[in-house]
Image: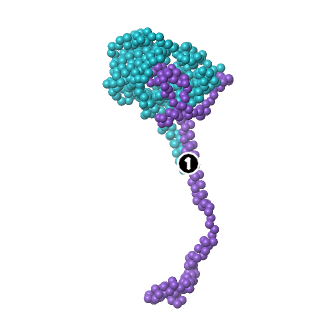
């Protein structure tokens, strides 16, 4: 009789624990996902100009943004106002980055759409709901506008959480935070913003001085590759991650091209760079690094190549991806 | 005198003599011996299981002769051992339960382990993936790879918040970072 009771207790403990701790998050509600859709569409519907700040690890960087959209194109100018000047012009997915101090221009294609406040993937699909539980939180005021807070809780420990402050009137993202539990890792927030105001097309063009002087132009992309063309591959992607693109990169001063594989889970992105070890590019010791905000870095060596994995995800996820890179036959 | 001691024992002595007799017995060792002997005789006659024998001197003699044993108390040790074994068995069952829970947890949530994409790849690879073991060398060196800023620049697509090419690096090795920020 007693032993039967003990067995019953044991079974209760064994099967009761998972039920209590599994925390199976429900599907995100339709209205919460509608907020995300509105947020993803807003930059295609509204002009805006303003100033926003980036804040992480007690570092603040202010940027000025001008965004204009019409039936044929979407154009943007973002100028970093603190530290070394940097101006990025975007015409749809073509980007040019001007560095006035070194008189250099880098051209690049936009892959991830991660420029604040336009950070959601296009077209917007349900990959976010698969990886995050999206929930409507309270209302809060940001830059004198009423905002709906959305909280995105990761469904597994492979990624960080997010919080979005969405303008109730226009659906524009006014503030975004990457969180680890209750701790804010990095955030972007508008300090001043004008929506649907008049925008002169001059403000979206480089200044005269930039056009007249001789600037050195570097195209960061040399060739896109079809799937399987690259001799490297990420053998097994962690749950929820998809491959965005494979390409060969021209990293300015390097004699050889660097292979680049980009992955995303809808919000977080991870890049894998593979570079042969040469005399000009000596081997670095393998190890883990961290940069500002949510960025984590993992370096490893595989058959005379440096494999560097970089992304806004926890270190364990970076390691998982970095370790599963293999060379094709 | 002996009759008076006997009368004292039987409670038949005159009240006024009692204190004198008791005082006399206390002072005289022989009388003490008599007193004890009478008690022993009385106990024996009454067939008492407790004989009134003065064993104190004998006991102290034996204690003096007893060698001092400096070993731990065996019975105590046994009890401790028993307690330890009990603790171990409790710990073992807790571990068993937790691991059973973990196994079930993994069965319940396979997405945490199962990879999303398993492309067909040849198992007879000439170059097998190098398994970076549990300790992929977290060196305490302060020189991050020189190309890391280029990588970050490309990865962030010029996004604000990232230091730019040629600027002072803000990349730290993880150990260093932990020391600085405590996370």
**Secondary structure beneath disc 1?**
helix
Nearest the eye: A115 or A163: A115
Give the drawing colour for chain B. purple
Q: Position of residue A281 (x, y in %)?
A: 59, 22
Q: Residue at x 41, y 11 (%)?
A: A209
Nearest the eye: A271 or A153: A271
Q: Is residue B20 above or below residue B111?
A: below
Give the drawing colour for chain A. cyan
Is residue A198 among the parts visible in the rendering?
yes
User: Mark 1, chain letter?
Assistant: B
Q: Is residue B112 above or below residue A65?
A: below
- On the image, which quarter does residue A7 sit in? top right
Q: Position of residue A180 (x, y in %)?
A: 46, 32
Q: How is the image coloured?
A: by chain
Nearest the eye: A197 or A101: A101
Q: Residue at x 47, y 17 (%)?
A: A102
Q: Is residue B146 above or below residue B42?
A: above
Is residue A168 among the parts visible in the rendering?
no
The residue at which mark 1 appears reads as B90
Nearest the eye: A72 or A305: A305
Q: Residue at x 60, y 76 (%)?
A: B58
Quadrant for the C terminus of chain A in the image: top right
State left or right for residue B108 relative to residue A190.
right
Instruction: Check the image and name the residue furthest to the left.
Output: A144
Q: Position of residue B121 (x, y in %)?
A: 63, 22
Number of marks present in the image shown: 1
């Amino acid at each position: 009789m007693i032993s039967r009771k003990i067995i019953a207790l044991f079974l209760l403990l064994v099967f009761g624990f998972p039920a209590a701790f599994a925390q199976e998050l429900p599907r995100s509600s339709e209205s919460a996902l509608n907020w995300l859709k509105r947020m993803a569409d807003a930059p295609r519907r509204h002009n805006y100009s303003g100033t926003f700040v980036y804040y992480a690890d007690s570092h603040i960087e202010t940027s000025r943004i001008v965004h204009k959209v019409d039936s044929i194109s979407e154009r943007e100018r973002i100028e970093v106002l603190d530290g070394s000047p940097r101006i990025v012009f975007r015409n749809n997915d073509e980007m040019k980055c001007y560095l006035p101090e070194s008189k250099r221009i880098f051209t690049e294609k936009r892959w991830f759409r991660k420029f604040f406040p336009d950070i959601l993937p296009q077209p917007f699909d349900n990959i976010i709901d698969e990886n995050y539980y999206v929930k409507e939180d309270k209302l809060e005021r940001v830059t004198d506008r009423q905002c709906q807070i959305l909280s995105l809780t990761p469904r597994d420990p492979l990624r960080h959480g997010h919080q979005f402050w969405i303008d109730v009137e226009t659906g524009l993202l006014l503030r975004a935070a990457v969180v680890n539990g209750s701790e804010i890792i990095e955030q972007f927030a508008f300090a001043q913003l004008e929506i649907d105001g008049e925008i002169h097309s001059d403000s979206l063009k480089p200044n005269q001085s930039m056009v007249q002087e001789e600037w050195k132009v570097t195209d960061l992309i040399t060739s896109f590759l079809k799937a399987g063309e690259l001799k490297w591959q990420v053998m097994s992607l962690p749950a929820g991650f998809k491959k965005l693109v494979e390409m060969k990169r021209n990293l300015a001063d390097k004699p050889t091209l660097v292979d680049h594989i980009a992955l995303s889970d809808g919000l977080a992105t991870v890049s894998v760079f593979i570079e042969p070890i040469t005399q000009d590019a000596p081997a670095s010791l393998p190890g883990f690094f961290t940069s500002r905000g949510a960025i984590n870095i993992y370096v490893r060596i595989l058959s005379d190549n440096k494999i560097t994995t970089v992304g806004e995800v926890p270190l364990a996820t970076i390691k998982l991806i970095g370790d599963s890179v293999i060379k094709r036959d | 005198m002996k009759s008076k001691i006997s009368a004292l024992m039987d409670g038949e002595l005159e009240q006024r003599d009692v204190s004198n007799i008791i005082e006399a017995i206390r002072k005289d060792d022989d009388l003490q011996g008599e007193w004890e002997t009478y008690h022993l005789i009385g106990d024996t006659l009454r067939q008492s299981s407790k004989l009134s024998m003065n064993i104190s001197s004998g006991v102290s003699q034996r204690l003096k002769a007893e060698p001092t044993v400096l070993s731990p108390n065996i019975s105590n040790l046994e009890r401790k051992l028993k307690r330890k074994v009990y603790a171990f068995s409790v710990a073992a069952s807790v571990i068993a339960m937790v691991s059973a829970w973990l196994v079930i947890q993994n069965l319940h949530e396979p997405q945490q382990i199962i990879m999303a994409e398993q492309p067909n790849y040849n198992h007879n690879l000439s170059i097998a993936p190098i398994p970076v073991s549990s300790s992929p060398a977290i060196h305490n060196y302060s020189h991050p790879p020189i190309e890391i800023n280029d990588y970050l620049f490309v990865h962030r697509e010029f996004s604000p918040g990232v230091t730019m090419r040629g600027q002072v690096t803000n990349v730290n090795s993880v150990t260093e970072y932990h020391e600085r920020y405590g996370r």
